[in-house]
Amino acid sequence: MGIVKGAKAKLAGVEAARAASEGRAIFIYRSNVPIASSRASGSVSGAAEVIETIEGQGWSLSDMAYDGGWSRKGALVLLFRRDG
């Protein structure tokens, strides 16, 4: 995993752990999409790493959407629910 992907995944894990420690049942996370991936077909750089890291904190991805208007790059909006 590259430096940027690793940093994005680590931050996502910290935020997911905080939400879990606060007793949250739902966790919504916005992850910026690299400009090269925003308009092209193919994998979205770093998205899988972020999702896997958050799920490693006991969350399950429930829904996701693309927010193209947030910035020039766009963002994935990910909704997670607690397992169990």
Image: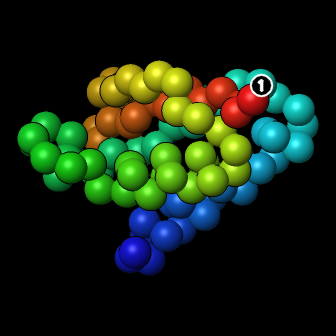
Q: Amino acid at mark 1?
A: Ala
How many marks the image carries: the answer is: 1
**In the picture provided, is 79 more to the left or to the right than 24?**
left
**In the picture provided, is 51 more to the left or to the right than 20?**
left
Task: State the quadrant of the C terminus.
Answer: top right
Above or below, 13 against 20 in this view is: below
Q: Say which residue appears at 47% left-offset and 22% top-offset.
A: 63
**Residue at the limit of the structure toward the front, as seen here:** 84
Q: Secondary structure at mark 1?
A: loop
**Residue at the limit of the structure toward the left, as seen here:** 41
The residue closer to the viewer here, 22 or 83, is 83
Image spot of residue 23 (x, y percent): 88, 32
Image spot of residue 46 (x, y percent): 37, 57
Q: Say which residue appears at 53% left-offset and 60% top-offset.
A: 9
Q: Residues within 10 Å of mark 1 (few under 14, many from 20)?
A: few
**In the picture provided, is 30 more to the left or to the right than 84?**
left
Image spot of residue 50 (x, y percent): 49, 52
Can see residue 15? no
Task: State the quadrant of the N terminus.
Answer: bottom left
Answer with the quarter of the image where residue 40 lies: top left
The residue closer to the viewer here, 12 or 71, is 12
Q: Say which residue appears at 33% left-offset and 45% top-offset.
A: 33
Can see residue 31? yes
Image spot of residue 54 (x, y percent): 60, 48
Above or below, 55 against 66 in this view is: below
The residue closer to the viewer here, 56 or 78, is 56
**Residue at the limit of the structure toward the right, as seen here:** 22
What residue would you read off at disc 1?
25
The residue closer to the viewer here, 67 or 1, is 1
